[in-house]
Image (cartoon, grey):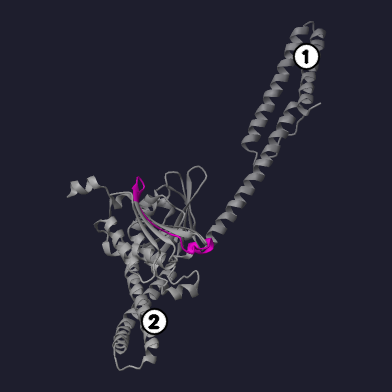
Amino acid sequence: MRPGHAALGYAAARVAGAALAGVLLGALLGRPFGGMALALAAYLLWHLAMLYRVEWWLQHRSVTEPPETGGVWGTVISLVARLHRRKRFHKERFVQLMRQLQLSTAALPNGVVILNAQREIVWFNRMAGRLLGLRRDTDLGVRIENLLREPQFGRYLAKGDYANPVIVRRSSPQDSYLSVQLVAYGDGQQLLLAADVSRQMRLEAVRRDFVANASHELRSPLTVISGYLETLSQDPSLDAEFAVPLAEMRRQAERMNAIVRDLLELSRLEETDERAGGEPLDVAGLMALLRRDVLARPVHPREVRLRIDSDAALIGKESEIHSAFANLVDNAAKYTPPEGSIEMRWWSDIEGGHFAVTDTGIGIPAEHIPRLTERFYRVDPGRSRATGGSGLGLAIVKHVLQRHGAELEIESTPGKGSTFTCHFPPERVLLPEAARSSG
């Protein structure tokens, strides 16, 4: 029999016993029903007294022991005491876990902020308070964008793509650079992770300054060397045996000049992360110009096609857009055999404007694609140097697209070819109707 059923049977037996005792006592006095009523009333008063004792113990159970009794009240008190001990155990365990969590988050080198579905601050660790200048007495419940007002972070939130962190420069509470990333979890909640990358950014700035200064210093002597080599190569009195070495020296000098030009261009693009302005560009005309440049090469792919699926203009800085598109087409021409083909395509849709360069060249293994836009990164160093590339073209493309709010998508299959696609946002696309009305 279950304990609850046993206690209920025991209570019923006690009620019956009290009633029977009252009847017998009342019979002796000639009032059997009066005796039974008196006995039941006394039994009820006892229950009321037990109820009061249990209620007082529940209010003071943290400092008093439970009453000792049997029957139904003993079972109830035993169950309540057991629940209280279980609750106290889980509470102590939760408090211990919270202390461990606070200690562990306090030891983290990165800042952690918990945000609710409205991006309001629910909790943050000590490092987040130091890095972001947050205070518990005033900033809990405040939207994070109202406290972190840097433009880079605002654009990051508006974009809605949190796969990669954003670098934010803060002038308050201290001049620093932070890497900030949002991570979604739970029911619309988010974690904001912040890390101090000031040292890395300063080292990067030193490196950029060194590269820019070295490039400027190299440009003048390279110009002089190239000039003398050209003069020597045109001298009719020069022995024929020097013609080949001079031609190779001129080729290498021109390659060095190209590297210096690309380094200077890349340094200029890296000086600022501000969005580029510009005017509407005739993409079809630019593509035709790039096609003529490819066909003018001594060695070029057999077929260079243009596919223009939109009359929309692209709003951007002409010199930068030309540089980016030219680098993509130049790469395709270098790595496509003479019997291969290149296709340049321009189209627009509700997602924006898109420029793609597709070739039937050697292709790129998948493991190299994430690093292609790094400066001087080469999939095949020997073959790349043989083609005369500087290793900076795709880095320039990446920075130009970033300044125009665009992204580069790379798809490639080794042995079959590659497709490089520039995706521009809708605000960079000007439809013909809008162009005519603005004119």
Q: Residues within 10 Å of mark 2 (few under 14, many from 20)?
A: some
Q: Which comes before the other along the chain, label 1 or label 2?
A: 1
Comparing 296 with 352, the one in front is 296
Name the residue located 35 percent from the left edge and 93 percent from the top edge. Answer: 239
- Residue 360 among those drawn in magenta: yes
Name the residue located 37 percent from the left edge and 63 percent from the top edge. Answer: 329
- Residue 208 among those drawn in magenta: no
Disc 1 marks which amino acid? Ala
User: How many marks on residues?
Assistant: 2
Secondary structure beneath label 1: helix
Residue under label 1: 19
Q: Residue furthest top?
A: 30
Measured Cα–Cα span from mark 1 to mark 2? 118 Å
Q: Is residue 222 left or right of residue 126?
A: left
Q: Which residues are magenta?
A: 347-370
Residue 228 % position (x, y): 30, 88
Name the residue located 29 percent from the left edge and 62 percent from the top edge. Answer: 289
Comparing 54 with 90, the one in front is 90
The part of the image, by quadrant, that contains residue 173 is: bottom left
Q: Residue furthest left?
A: 439
Q: Which mark is residue 252?
A: 2
The part of the image, by quadrant, that contains residue 222 is: bottom left
Residue 378 % position (x, y): 47, 70
> Is residue 150 in view from this perspective?
no
Disc 2 marks which amino acid? Gln
Q: Nearer the viewer, mark 1 or mark 2?
A: 2
